[in-house]
Image (spheres, grey):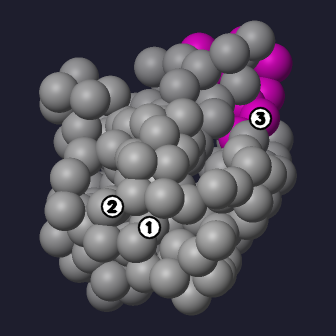
Amino acid sequence: MKNKNERLMEIRRLIGSRNISSQDELMKLLEKKGFELTQATLSRDLKYLKVAKMPDDREGYVYILPDKEKSVEEVELPGSGLSGLISIDFAQGMAILRTLPGHANSIAYTIDNLDAYEIAGTIAGDDTILLIPRDGVSRSDVINLLKLRMPGLIQELVH
């Protein structure tokens, strides 16, 4: 049985060398290399390595390593230092913003401080923001507000 450090190094090598889109796919690759582990262990390893997922044209989403974040086409707000928004989606009239790990709080804080009538508030986790619009505010109202008040933040994410 191989040790944890060897396993972590192999996870980094696999993620760095190919597009891997699921834990199941990664677990099968590790098993081929002689590693025995559970899904829970793999999940903890990914969290420990600060592995994130980013959109990919062919695979949907793929794992990336933190030192590769620089190669991610992040949207940056001029002069604010904010970056890391990955996607925006809507459900039940609310917006769900996905970010790179650790970026949600700063983006949500900035959105809250826009003092925009359209936004009732936000709730942020580590990599997800729930944006709650006021009653009667549409999806396009929210997108237009963010485009106007936070230029560049969602331009490339909205088609």
Q: Where residue 132 is drawn, which disc sits there? A: 3
Position of 146 relative to 14 (above/below): above
| Between 71 and 143, the one nearer to me in the picture | 71
Label 3 crowding class (10 Å Cα cut-off): few <14, some 14-19, many 20+? some
Answer yes or no: do the residues labelled 2 and 1 have beta carbons within 8 Å?
yes
| Mark nearer the viewer, 2 or 3 | 2
Residue 135 falls within the magenta-colored stretch: yes
Q: Which of the marked residues, 2 or 3, is nearer the chain's N terminus?
A: 2
- Residue 70 among those drawn in magenta: no
User: Circle 1 sits on which residue?
Assistant: 11
In the foreground, 33 or 18: 33
Q: Secondary structure at mark 2?
A: helix
Q: Which residue is mark 2?
A: 15
Residue 55 location (% of width, % of height): 32, 40
Q: Say which amino acid is labelled 1.
A: Ile
Q: Which residue is rendered at x = 45% and y = 19% of the image? A: 140
Residue extent of the magenta highlight = 131-138
